[in-house]
Amino acid sequence: MQKLLLFTLFLLLIFGFRLIDRFQKWNIHENDPYLWIKLCDRSTLFQDNTLPKEDPLTSRTDISIAEAMQTIVDDYNSLYGSYLRLELYPADTNAPAEGSTFTVDRAKKRTIDICDSDLFMAGGQASWEYEGEKIVGCTIRYQKGAMNDVHAFLSVLTHEIGHCVGLHHPQESIHAIMSYFANRELYRLQIDDKMGVRYLYPQTLEGIDHKEHNSMGMSCHYRAYE
Ligand SMILES: [Zn+2]
C-alpha cells in the first residue's frame, strides 16, 4: 500500500497534476490558428457606458456590439506566447476583411456562435460541441437587456469566450475573469486567464518552446551558472 502511494506521488512529481485533468481545445495549430466569432447582432449600440476613464472606449455613446467584440478579439490576440487567433466572422461572407484567410468552409468547425437570448441566465452561458477530444463548435448566449452597458458586455463575453477556447473556472479570483467569484469590475483578461490560454495554445517564439513543463513549483531546470 505504502509502495503504491509512493509510486503515485512519484508519478505526480514527474508529470505534474495537470495530466489528471483533461483539457479540451480546438483543432487549430500554430500555422493555422484561427477561430471565427459569429455575431447574431452586430449593429445594436450600447445604451450605457460605465467603462473607467483610462479605457480607450470611455464616454463613447456610439459603440456597436461588433466594435466592442473587436476589442475582446484584440485582447485575446495580443497574448504574448499564445498562437490562438480570433477573428470576427465577416458580415458579408463574400467580402472578408483584407488579409483574412476566411472562407465559409474554413470556418466550419471553427466558429463561436454568439446571440442574445430572452432566457434568464447569470449574464451568459457557453456550451461546447466536441468531436473526440477536440472542440469543433461553441455557442454563447447572453441575456438580452442585462447587456445594455458595454462594461457588462465586455465582462461577460470575455468570460464566455474564455470557456469557448477551453478555460474553466479557476480558484484564483483576483487575477482571473474566468473565476466564478471574479470581481465585477473586471472586464478584460487577467494574468491567470492569459496563462491558461497560453498553456492551451503555446506559441514557439524565436525557437523557444513555450509549452509548460509542470514541475509543481520545484524547478528541475535550475542549474548553477558556471
Ligand atoms: Zn463561467
Image (spheres, rainbow, N blue to C red):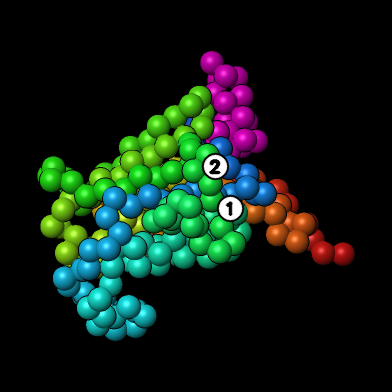
Q: In the image, which residues are magenta? A: 1-19
Between 70 and 94, the residue placed more toward the observer is 94
The answer to whether marks 1 and 2 mark residues whose Cβ atoms lie closer than 8 Å is yes
Q: Residue at x 40, y 45 (%)?
A: 112
- Classify mark 2: helix, strand or loop: helix
What is the quadrant of the C terminus in the image? bottom right
Q: Is residue 175 depicted above or below 58 in this figure? A: above
Between 40 and 180, the residue placed more toward the observer is 40
Between 167 and 153, the residue placed more toward the observer is 153
Estimate the x, y position of residue 144 in percent, counting from the top left: 16, 53
* Residue at the spot of label 1: 101
Looking at this view, name the residue that lies furthest to the front.
94
Estimate the x, y position of residue 137 in percent, counting from the top left: 42, 37
Count of picture labels: 2
* Residue at the spot of label 2: 106
What is the three-letter code of the residue carrying label 1? Thr
What is the quadrant of the N terminus in the image? top right
Label 1, label 2: how far apart the Cα atoms are: 8 Å
For the question of whether residue 187 can be seen, the reply is: no
Estimate the x, y position of residue 200 in percent, counting from the top left: 54, 46
Between 67 and 167, the residue placed more toward the observer is 67
- Classify mark 1: helix, strand or loop: loop
Does the magenta run of residues contain 12? yes
Does the magenta run of residues contain 197? no
